[in-house]
């Protein structure tokens, strides 16, 4: 949910030592930063943002960063270890491969691939129920060139677009707003955003979460078309349409890493 601002440039990989242990972090420059800002990213792990190099005192930020991280080393190690555990759990689920599991609407679905089931170049995906649990059945086309993760991603994006469109149609009239434009992307650190010009952006990965969490993000961004801050009036507006918004946002925070790694599949040789 965070909102418009300057986009940090491409991250570079650095290392900081805590005693005998080395921890990697990605360094990003952002015009929004006034000092050191640390976040935990579902894909990139520990991310440190600092002001641009041309800002006074920030050409060589390593000293500032290491002092900042060492002062908070317990928090850093706790979150880095949590990411490692969640990545291992995602690896165990298997992701986008035959027999793997991926979330859809908050429930794990096993992926079943049927080779050569469709003539032509476009494979199909169908959600199906089975005695052993829900499945995403991928009928592979004979001339298919896309990898399995891309096939599933495109199918999921279509489901996400439809779900978000339905949620907007349900809530926008009641909130007295109408977005000018709606985009679907795959951002690293937000589930949605809103601009003062009426443009909304949503992560397609919301379709992996429970429907209530997707609904909350849609209501959140629609509410920003009336109230752009996060004061009491804003939260009252959100609660008027989505009373469960606090629990829904908490679910997304707890499961952010899992959703961003949902389609990652381990190499077949186990490496």
Image (cartoon, grey):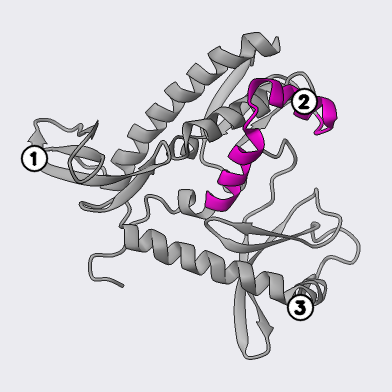
**Residue 49 in sight here:** yes
- The local secondary structure at tag 1 comes to strand
**Residue 147 in sight here:** no
Numbered disc total: 3
Mark 3 highlights which residue?
70
Please give the label number shown on residue 116. 1
Q: Residue at x 23, y 65 (%)?
A: 268
Mark 2 highlights which residue?
236
Q: Earlier in the sequence, mark 1 or mark 2?
A: 1
- The local secondary structure at tag 3 comes to helix
User: Which stretch is magenta?
Assistant: 229-255
Provide the major secondary structure of the magenta segment: helix
Task: Please state the horizontal and vertical placement of residue 153, each as a whole percent of the image.
Answer: 36, 39
Q: Is residue 236 above or below residue 52?
A: above
Task: Please state the horizontal and vertical placement of residue 128, each as a whole percent of the image.
Answer: 22, 33
Mark 1 and mark 3: span between their CA atoms?
A: 55 Å
């Amino acid at each position: 949910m965070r909102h418009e601002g300057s986009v940090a440039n491409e991250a570079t990989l650095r290392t900081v030592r805590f005693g005998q242990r080395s921890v990697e972090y990605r360094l990003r420059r952002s015009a929004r930063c006034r000092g050191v800002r640390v976040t935990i990213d579902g894909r990139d792990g520990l991310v440190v943002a600092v002001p641009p190099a041309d800002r006074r005192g920030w050409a060589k930020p390593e000293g500032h960063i290491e002092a900042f991280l060492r002062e908070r080393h317990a928090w850093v190690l706790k979150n880095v270890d949590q990411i490692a555990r969640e990545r291992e759990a995602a690896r165990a689920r298997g992701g986008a491969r035959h027999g793997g599991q991926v979330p859809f609407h908050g429930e794990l679905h096993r992926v079943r691939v049927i080779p050569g089931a469709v003539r032509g170049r476009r494979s199909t995906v169908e959600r199906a129920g089975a005695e052993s649990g829900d499945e995403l059945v991928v009928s592979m086309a004979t001339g298919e060139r896309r990898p399995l993760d891309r096939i599933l991603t495109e199918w999921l994006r279509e489901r996400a677009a439809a779900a978000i469109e339905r949620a907007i149609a349900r809530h926008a009239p009641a909130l007295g707003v109408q977005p000018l434009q709606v985009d679907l992307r795959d951002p690293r650190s937000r589930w949605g955003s809103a601009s003062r010009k009426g443009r909304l952006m949503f992560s397609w990965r919301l379709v992996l979460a429970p429907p209530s969490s997707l609904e909350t993000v849609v209501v959140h961004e629609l509410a920003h078309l009336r109230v752009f801050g996060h004061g009491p009036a804003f939260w009252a507006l959100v609660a008027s349409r989505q009373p469960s918004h606090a629990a829904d946002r908490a679910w997304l925070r707890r499961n952010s890493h899992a959703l961003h790694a949902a389609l990652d599949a381990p190499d077949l040789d186990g490496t």
